[in-house]
Amino acid sequence: MKLFSGNSNLPLAKKLAGDLGLSLGKLEITTFPDNENRARVIDRVVDEKVVVIESTGISPNHYYMELFFILDSIHRSGAEFITLVAPYLGYQRQDHIFRDGEAVSLEVIIKILESLGVSKVISFDLHSIKIPELFHVQVDHLSALPIFAGEIEKMFNSNLEDVVLVSPDMGGIRRVEELSRLLNGRADFISIDKDRDLNSGSVQSVKINGRVKKTAIIVDDVISTGQTLISATKLLEKNGAKKVMVMATHGVFSDNAAENLQRSDIEKVIVTDTLDIPVERQFGKLQIVSVSNLISEALSK
Ligand code: R5P
């Protein structure tokens, strides 16, 4: 197996290479003065099983173009089988038409990836469990929930009577249900009804379905602006939560998310390293855990 990485998440790629006992394959990736990208594979890949890792959540347009050229260079050079590890798959939230006349961005991305010879995709906590069905190739849909279950065990020493797992919207209910199952049903789970204005993108948490406890752990797939979490936290506090924590797989932290989350009442925000979070998007309450082992296990199967 040969492993190549784009530039979006080199720390995770290097960790993964270490876990797999491999070194990263050689690519030449350059940018022209007009910002166009160029990619060339240097190592021989003829008849090889190749893994390419790229995370397209921060600067998705730039890193998707880089990824397309890396894949094309490897495909043209005769690789036998290409697995794409996309720890975060950009554009996944536009997976269907929300308003008349919209593009289905994720379908466009899938068409391009498949036309560039991708035979298998490994990704984490996709926005909807239906996303793998949009692909024509195998998708290994991994989850960071086992890591979060471990973190909860460490923090609460199995003492979970005062803890409730919270989905900040109805779409995420299966996540908290699964996390509760991983904790052997020792933590209850509830959900919140959330309204999002599709034109402005603004978010309002309107209603809690279930009983709030002293400690609320909000579980989500992705944090972008942080509005969902901040709005959910206010509603949970109004309904009796004394301590609110967050566990989310992908930390995009766009706009002023880092600043706003640091200033909020949320006590701790745990995300994974599916995205390489630049220093300016990191903040004191943030803790980052690694998914590298889960990827290496999936690749070793
Ligand atoms: C939405 O359905 C997702 O699960 C996340 O809750 C959402 O994308 C987070 O976005 P933001 O941080 O901008 O509220």
Image: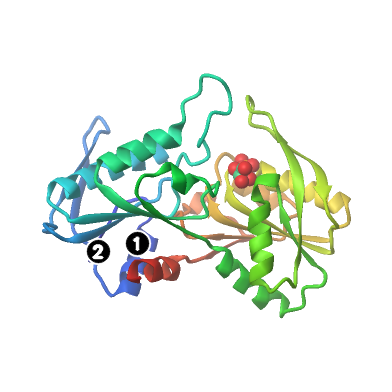
Q: Which residue is found at the position 88% from the left and 56% from the top?
A: 240
Q: Residue under circle 1? A: 13
Question: Any atom of ligand 1 within 8 Å of the CB at mark 2?
Answer: no
Dividing the image into 4 quarters, which one contains the N terminus? Answer: bottom left
Q: Secondary structure at mark 1?
A: helix
> Mark 2 touching mark 1, by CB under 8 A?
yes
Q: Which amino acid type is shown beneath numbered disc 2?
A: Leu
| Mark before the other along the chain sequence, 2 or 1 | 1
8 to 19, vertically: above or below: above
Q: Looking at this view, name the residue that lies furthest to the bottom.
A: 157
Image quarter of residue 276 = bottom left
Query: Alpha-carbon neighbours of circle 2 within 10 Å: few (<14), some, or many (≥20)?
Result: some
95 to 76, vertically: above or below: above
Q: Which residue is found at the position 64% from the left and 62% from the top?
A: 178
Dividing the image into 4 quarters, which one contains the C terminus? Answer: bottom left
Dot label at residue 198: none
Q: Residue under circle 2? A: 24
Residue 40 appears left or right of 261: left
212 to 297, vertically: above or below: above
